[in-house]
Amino acid sequence: MLALVAALTFVATNDPRQLVWIGMLVIAALPAFLARRHPLLAPAGRFAEVALTGLAAGSVAAAADAVTGRVDAGFGAEAVLPYLAVPMLTAALRRRSSEGAALLGVAAVTMIAGGALAGTLTQLGYLAVAGQWLVLGAIVTFAAETMRQFLQPAEPTPQPYAEATRLLTQLRSVARSLPGATLDPGGISEHLLEELRLVAPGHRAAVLSASGGGRLVVLAQTGAERVDWETTLDADSAIADAWATQQPQVASRSQARSHRTAEVSSLTIPLVAGVRTIGLVILETDEAGAYPSAVLQAVTEVTGPAALRLEAALLFDDVRSLATNEERQRLAREIHDGVAQELVMVGYGIDNAQATLPEGAEETAEELRTLRSEVTRVIQELRLSLFELRSEVDRNGGLAAAIAEYARTLGTSAGLRVHFTFDESTARLPAATEAELLRIAQEAITNARKHAGASNLWVTCTVDPPYAEIEVSDDGKGFADNRPDGRYGLTIMAERAERIRGRLKITPRHPSGTTVAVVLGTPPGRDSVRDSVSAPEGE
């Protein structure tokens, strides 16, 4: 641009002295060219370029008029004013809109000053050229960003499945690199409570997270006695306030429904990841004024990093539950549309064969009746398997209702008398934990129906989050045999119990039968921070 302006200026004026302006422009452009990222030198250089260009316009216009002999033209300013595009475009491309506006102002002022000094300010040609380049400068300044975005190639939109594969691969890699390779919300919550024991006094503590429907679930808690925490977010409580405001809440009354001690200090800390509240930590002690600002600061320093860990664990739990449920539904559809339909057709074929048997073929008729009974039994087993695959814990009904429905259905099909004992708190376990407990109960009930030869089935369900115990007993022949399918079922139950940090117990029932129990947490009346206990191999 400097070379172009120099050539136009010399052609228009035929005066080498006017090239001094070009030399001055070269000097003024050096800071913006050599120190283009400097916060002061680069803008100063651009302002100097604009000022010199504006001043040069009047001088070059007067010199051009002297060559042409016209004293009222002023069009010679066109030779030097194109250089205004350089500093203004540079400012626009660097997204400095305020600097671009200031450069326009400097250009207008210096054009007026240059025209006044050279005597060309009153010439219509000079005013037209100056106005033209001011308009072009404004377009360059305010339209460059839009043009840059328009000319930038659009990033390809990733396909949903390709993007899902990429994200899941990253999730798997990150999960494997975590300390202990764990993404268990219960384990992370218990570790958080252990850390808080060291920095804040407390007789009771709990970690709660959202479960949908405006309710919270207890992930872990500590204390000499079990506490019935307030789990609704629409109640007038510090829990609801902390969740809504994302600010710690100190109160002089307990956040438990069942606590009646006169003097209580309660501290509720929201666990915030980004802009979302993903859980709460509640600390309580039977002393007044136990949580001053210093303790509050120490607690928040611990809960801040823990919020991100807990959110990762909860998200991972959701992804795993979604994938598991989708796979169970897919298997149910495949069985229903495939094997089940084919077995039904086999049954119809056996019926047709029986109907067309000649007289006297009693032995063949008996074999066909036996085969038809076996096909009917297999179809019934498939239907029960489909029912098991499609059974889920209703967020309104609860875990006990889901277990009762399954036990009642299987008991009716097998002629079992089913006896229920339920003690379920209004508080809920996490959805993933309830799903695993339901699958363990289903496996235990199915084993009793298939292999025990029992007449009675006793199902006990006790839920007091984070504690839970599911017990299934029968009066059959017990586990004296070594069936491979039975052993595989026990292994699956043990793996499910270990996944939710539970304990699987299988014991003989007196005088006959077997008791299968899964225990999550510790019973009321004991400290509820659990040790990670898995079922022994083969149990």
Image (cartoon, helix red, strand yellow):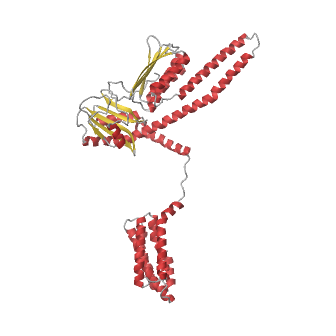
Q: Visible in this render: residue 434? A: yes
Tell me residue 151's x, y (percent). Answer: 54, 61
Quadrant position of residue 56: bottom left
Residue at x-position 40% and y-position 34%: 215
Residue beneath the point at 68% across and 24% down: 345
Name the image quarter holding residue 427.
top left
Q: Residue furthest bottom?
A: 69
**302 to the left or right of 15:** left
Q: Position of residue 323 (x, y in %)?
A: 52, 36
Please state the horizontal and vertical placement of residue 228, each as a whole percent of the image: 34, 29
- In this view, the residue in front, 161 or 337, is 337
- Closer-to-camera residue (228/312): 228
Q: Residue at x 32, y 30 (%)?
A: 257
Q: Residue at x 40, y 77 (%)?
A: 110
Examine the rendering and report whether any part of residue 486 can be seen: no
437 versus 102 height, above or below? above
Q: Is residue 210 above or below residue 27?
A: above
Percent position of residue 488, x then y: 52, 23
